[in-house]
Image (cartoon, grey):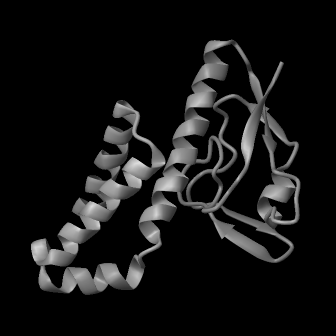
């Protein structure tokens, strides 16, 4: 049942990309899905499980994070189409930069060369981040404000 949940959300994100939804539109659709779940369209124990793991702010967080990922991947596709072979990780260079992104700031890799692979752990100054997906571009984590700069 929970695999179906992740599949439904993935399909929703794909639809959002293909139809050019705004972050607000994606967030609203996620709220609708959560509402449907909360109305009992899932087994009785599913809502308790979901409620424990997805507080109200999660829909907003998911839509913003996925929107950043979609934007970053689109930029990579454009860079590749333009023949750009390297990209540089860039932070906002302010006091809110996390230790992981701070460590990546300014580093360069080949376009579509992964920064990290699933299962890796990125540790900086005793702060560890478990990598859950192949990282080709920001976001590295939720609330990540980083971006890639093409190297000409």
Residue drawn 79% across the image and 42% down it: 89
User: Viewer-proximal residue, 113 or 76?
Assistant: 76
- The answer to which quarter of the image holds residue 127 is bottom right
Asked whether 151 or 29 is in front, the reply is: 29
**Lateral position of residue 25 relative to residue 112, left or right:** left
Question: Position of 73 compared to 129: left or right?
Answer: left
Residue 140, image x, y percentages: 65, 55
Q: Residue at x 81, y 50 (%)?
A: 91
| In the depicted structure, whether residue 104 falls above or below residue 14 | below
Judge whether 80 appears above or below 38 on screen: above
Q: Is residue 48 visible?
A: yes
Locate residue 21, reporting x and y percent.
40, 39
State the image coordinates of residue 17 (x, y, percent, origin top left).
40, 36
Check the image and name the residue furthest to the top.
82
Q: For this view, does 151 lie left or right of residue 115?
A: right
Tally the numbered discs.
0
Rendered location of residue 32, percent (x, y)? 26, 62
Residue 1 visible at all: no
User: Residue 150 vs residue 138: left or right?
Assistant: right
- Nearer to me, 132 or 71: 71
Quadrant housing residue 131: bottom right
The quadrant of the rendering that contains the C terminus is top right
Residue under the point 57% across and 61% down: 119
Which part of the image, by quadrant, shows the N terminus? bottom left
């Amino acid at each position: 049942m929970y695999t179906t949940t992740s599949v439904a959300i993935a399909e929703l994100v794909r639809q959002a990309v293909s139809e050019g939804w705004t972050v607000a539109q994606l967030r609203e659709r996620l709220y609708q899905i959560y509402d449907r779940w909360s109305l009992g369209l899932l087994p009785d124990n599913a809502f308790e499980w979901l409620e424990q793991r997805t507080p109200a702010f999660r829909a907003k967080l998911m839509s913003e994070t996925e929107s950043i990922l979609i934007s970053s991947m689109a930029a990579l596709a454009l860079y590749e189409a333009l023949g750009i072979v390297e990209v540089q990780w860039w932070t906002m260079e302010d006091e809110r930069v996390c230790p992981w992104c701070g460590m990546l700031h300014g580093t360069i890799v080949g376009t579509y060369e992964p920064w990290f692979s699933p299962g890796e752990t990125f540790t900086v100054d005793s702060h560890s981040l478990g990598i859950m997906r192949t990282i080709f571009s920001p976001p590295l984590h939720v609330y990540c404000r980083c971006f890639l700069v093409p190297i000409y």
